Image (spheres, rainbow, N blue to C red):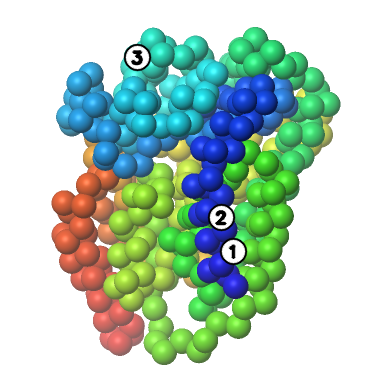
C-alpha cells in the first residue's frame, strides 16, 4: 500500500507538465521559484501557481557551459541549462521568475535569465538575529508582493494571504507527521522514497489533491506493521546541500550498504517544515519572520542549523552524520568545518563529509567510503 501511494506521488509529478499546460490554457499565471526563502504563499494568495525550477540532472550542462564556468555549482548549472535549452517545461510556463541572493553564483545567473523572463531578485540580509535585518526583509517581502501582483494581475490581500498561510501550515504539519515515522526502530519507508513525496509538493498545482494523497500516506505509514529487524542498522542523519530524487546518490547508497537514513535536515528535508508561519497579526510580517529564520549556510552566523541538527539527532536517535556538499558550493563547503566540529565534539557522533556533483563518475568512490563508514560504526558497537 505504501509503495503504491508513493508511486502515485511520482506519477502526479510526471503528470505535472500536462497539468500546468492545461492551467495555463485556462488563463492561470505561473511563477517560477528557486529557493524556500521566497514565500510561495504570496504567489498562491495572488491566485497564481508557484513551481520549482531547480535542476538536478547533468543533461543540460553542455548548454549551460556556453555561458557558465565548468567549475560551477551543479545545481545552478543544471537549473540554468534546463532553462535556456528549453528542456524545462516549467520555466517555459512561468510568466515570471523570483530569485534571491543566497549565493553569488545565483545572483549573476539571474542577470542572464532576465533576458528570457521578467525576474525579481529578493535581497537577503546575511544576519538573522537583528531587528534591522528583519525590518529590511519585511520590506523585501512587501516589494516582491507588489511584483507578483503586477506580473499576475492578481491582488494579494490580507485575507487571501492568511488563507494561503493556513493551507501551507497544514501541509507542513502533515509532512512533519509523515517524517515522525522515522522515530521507529524499523520505519516502513525509506528516506529516499519519502523524497518523492516532498518533491511532489513543488509540482502538484492542486494543494487539496496533494494533501488528500498525503493523508492516505500518513494513514498507511501509521497502520504498517514493520517486519522484525534481522540486525541493528546504523541510523544516519544526512545534512548539507539540497537533494532531489534524481540526484540522490548518498541516501540510496546508505540504504543499499545496510544503513538507515532517519533524517535529512536540508532544504529538501525537515528544514522546509520544521517551523510554521504565525497565523496571528500581520501576515506579511509573519512570512518575513519565518522565512528569514530558515537556517541556510548563506546566513552568518548560521546557529539555527545546529539547533535543528541537535533536535533531530535526539528525536531520531541518530548514530552518525553524513554531510553532503555539492562541488563549488562554497558556503556549505566552508560551513562543513563548523558542522564537523559540532557533530564530533558536541553531539559526540561519527562524521563523514562527501563532496559530489550530479554525475555518476564518483558513485563507486562514494559507495566505498559509505560502506567503510557504516562498518566502522557497526564495529564500534561490538567493542562497546
- The quarter in which the N terminus is drawn is bottom right
The residue mark sitting in front, 2 or 3, is 2
Q: Earlier in the sequence, mark 2 or mark 3?
A: 2
Residue 13, position as x, y percentages in the image: 52, 47
In the displayed structure, 233 sits above or below 227; it is above
Q: Which residue is mark 2?
A: 9
Q: Is residue 205 left or right of residue 33?
A: right
Dot 2 alpha-carbon crowd within 10 angstroms: few under 14, some 14 to 19, many 20 or more: many
Q: Quadrant location of residue 105?
A: top left
Q: Tell me the distance, in whole angstroms, between the alpha carbons under discs 2 and 1.
A: 7 Å
Q: Tell me the distance, in whole angstroms, between the alpha carbons under discs 1 and 3.
A: 40 Å
Q: Tell me the distance, in whole angstroms, between the alpha carbons under discs 2 and 3.
A: 33 Å
Q: Which residue is mark 3?
A: 112
Residue 5, label in figure: 1
Label 3: element kind: helix
Label 2: element kind: helix
Amino acid at each position: 500500500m505504501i509503495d503504491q501511494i508513493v508511486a502515485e506521488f511520482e506519477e502526479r509529478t510526471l503528470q505535472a507538465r500536462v497539468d500546468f499546460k492545461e492551467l495555463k490554457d485556462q488563463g492561470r499565471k505561473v511563477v517560477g521559484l528557486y529557493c524556500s526563502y521566497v514565500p510561495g504563499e504570496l504567489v498562491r494568495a495572488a491566485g497564481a501557481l508557484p513551481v520549482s525550477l531547480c535542476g538536478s540532472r547533468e543533461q543540460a550542462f553542455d548548454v549551460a557551459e556556453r555561458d557558465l564556468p565548468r567549475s560551477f555549482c551543479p545545481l545552478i548549472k543544471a537549473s540554468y541549462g534546463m532553462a535556456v535549452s528549453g528542456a524545462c517545461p516549467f520555466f517555459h510556463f512561468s510568466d515570471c521568475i523570483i530569485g534571491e541572493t543566497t549565493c553569488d553564483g545565483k545572483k549573476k545567473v539571474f542577470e542572464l535569465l532576465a533576458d528570457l523572463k521578467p525576474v525579481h531578485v529578493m535581497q537577503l540580509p546575511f544576519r538573522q538575529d537583528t531587528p534591522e535585518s528583519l525590518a529590511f526583509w519585511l520590506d523585501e517581502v512587501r516589494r516582491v508582493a507588489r511584483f507578483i501582483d503586477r506580473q499576475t494581475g492578481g491582488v494579494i490581500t490580507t485575507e487571501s494571504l492568511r488563507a494561503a498561510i493556513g493551507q501551507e501550515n497544514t501541509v507542513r504539519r502533515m509532512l512533519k507527521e509523515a517524517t515522525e515515522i522515522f522515530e521507529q526502530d524499523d520505519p516502513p519507508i525509506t528516506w529516499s522514497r519519502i523524497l518523492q513525496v516532498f518533491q511532489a509538493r513543488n509540482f502538484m498545482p492542486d494543494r487539496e489533491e496533494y494533501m488528500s494523497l498525503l493523508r492516505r500516506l500518513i494513514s498507511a505509514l501509521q497502520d504498517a506493521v514493520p517486519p522484525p529487524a534481522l540486525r541493528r542498522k546504523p541510523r544516519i542523519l544526512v545534512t548539507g546541500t539540497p537533494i532531489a530524487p534524481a540526484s540522490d546518490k548518498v541516501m540510496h547508497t546508505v540504504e543499499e550498504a545496510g544503513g538507515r537514513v532517519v533524517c535529512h535536515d536540508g532544504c529538501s528535508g525537515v528544514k522546509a517544515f520544521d517551523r510554521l508561519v504565525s497565523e496571528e497579526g500581520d501576515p506579511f510580517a509573519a512570512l518575513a519572520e519565518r522565512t528569514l529564520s530558515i537556517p541556510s549556510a548563506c546566513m552568518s552566523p548560521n546557529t539555527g542549523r545546529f539547533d535543528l541538527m541537535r533536535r533531530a539527532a535526539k528525536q531520531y536517535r541518530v548514530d552518525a552524520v553524513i554531510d553532503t556538499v555539492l562541488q563549488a558550493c562554497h558556503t556549505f563547503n566552508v560551513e562543513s568545518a563548523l558542522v564537523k566540529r559540532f557533530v564530533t565534539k558536541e553531539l559526540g557522533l561519527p562524521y563523514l563529509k562527501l563532496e559530489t556533483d550530479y554525475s555518476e563518475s564518483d558513485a563507486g568512490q562514494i559507495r566505498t567510503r559509505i560502506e567503510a563508514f557504516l562498518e566502522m560504526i557497526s564495529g564500534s558497537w561490538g567493542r562497546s
